[in-house]
Image: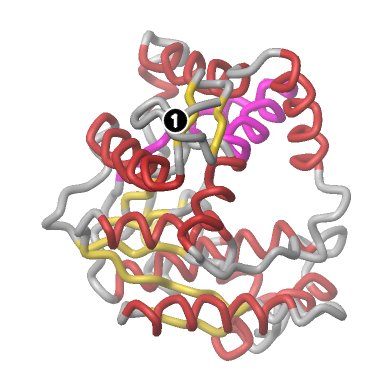
Amino acid sequence: MKCKKCGQRASVNMPQHNLGLCREHFLEWVPEQTERFIKKYAMFTHEEKILVAVSGGKDSLSLWDILHRLGYRADGLYIALGIDEGVDYSVESQRLAEKFAAERGLTLHVVNVQEQTGKTIPEWAETSLRGRQKPCAVCGLVKRHEMNRIARDLGYDVLATGHNLDDEAAVLFGNTLSWSREYLLRQAPVLPGTPGLARKVKPLCRFYEREMAAYALLRGIEYIYEECPYSAGASSIRYKELLNQLEHDQPGAKLAFYLKFLDARQQGLFSAQEEKQLELHPCPNCGQPTSAPGLCSYCRMVGEFGG
């Protein structure tokens, strides 16, 4: 396939878009599309302060790189989880995040979970009821709390994550199988902010994982290739495999699945009452908004299990 813009041999072929691009034009196309998505979904402006949650992986580092290239005021946040099950996963991912920031003169905030809570994520998984079966639940709880805390305390307007289309389609597939309306309600490119909660955005939500891997490779971004050691057997991986089979037979199926869901939302898939956010109140301990009576889930976990 030839590059659609210059006629040279394409470096990246995207059958889902019926598009092939050479290296130069692909590296132009990705930021252009990202800017288009940012404006389409009214994610943020150039005047706002953006905090990018970075993990050391290809998507989050590529997102930070793209926003920097587009001239946005974007800093990074790395959360050290203490996950080092034989592969030094957290140590290596932190090294790569710090290396990326240092090479570009960018600001990276580092939060150590053990220093904040007294335990690493694996230790929390062993002791808390929430994490006894698998660390993912407690990990997600801690990361959400810390991301919002840093965004709030340091005055950021927006919290951006590197979720790509494959991530979003897999989550949507799982929530649709069980018709989890509560979770479907929260799946969108933008979650509006409320007092005490930062606006959350996903600028890469319409890019395939393969496209982001190509971007990182062609931009020379060094990232951690290993998946989290606790991700093995996760439902989301099985859903991705099923969707990949469908995509192979029908290019563009994942993108159509996700976009048609967003269209259905806009056209009234959920009632106005469902669309209304849950009534929130400040946690009396940490001050973060919560719908739970009394303490938020994070503070209850830390208080009950000895943080």
Q: Residue at x 34, y 77 (%)?
A: 104
Q: Is residue 97 above or below residue 40?
A: below
Label 1 crowd bin: few (<14), some (14–19), many (20+), radius 10 Å = many
Front position in the image: 100 or 258? 100
Vertical comparison of 273 with 294: above or below? above
Decide which of 255, 278 is in the foreground and name it: 255
Query: In the shown orientation, is residue 253 left or right of residue 19?
Result: right
Reading the image, the residue beneath label 1 is: 3
Residue 32 visible: yes
Residue at (32% x, 77% y) in the render: 106
- Residue depicted at 82% across the width and 36% down the height: 238
Q: x, y (%) of residue 213?
A: 58, 50
Q: Residue furthest top?
A: 267
Residue 274 figure quarter: top left
Q: Position of residue 143 (x, y in %)?
A: 55, 65
Magenta stretch bounds: 164-192
Q: Quadrant of the C terminus?
A: bottom right
Q: Residue furthest front?
A: 8
Q: Quadrant of the N terminus?
A: top right
Asked which colour scheme the image uses, the reply is: secondary structure
Identify residue type, mark 1. Answer: Cys
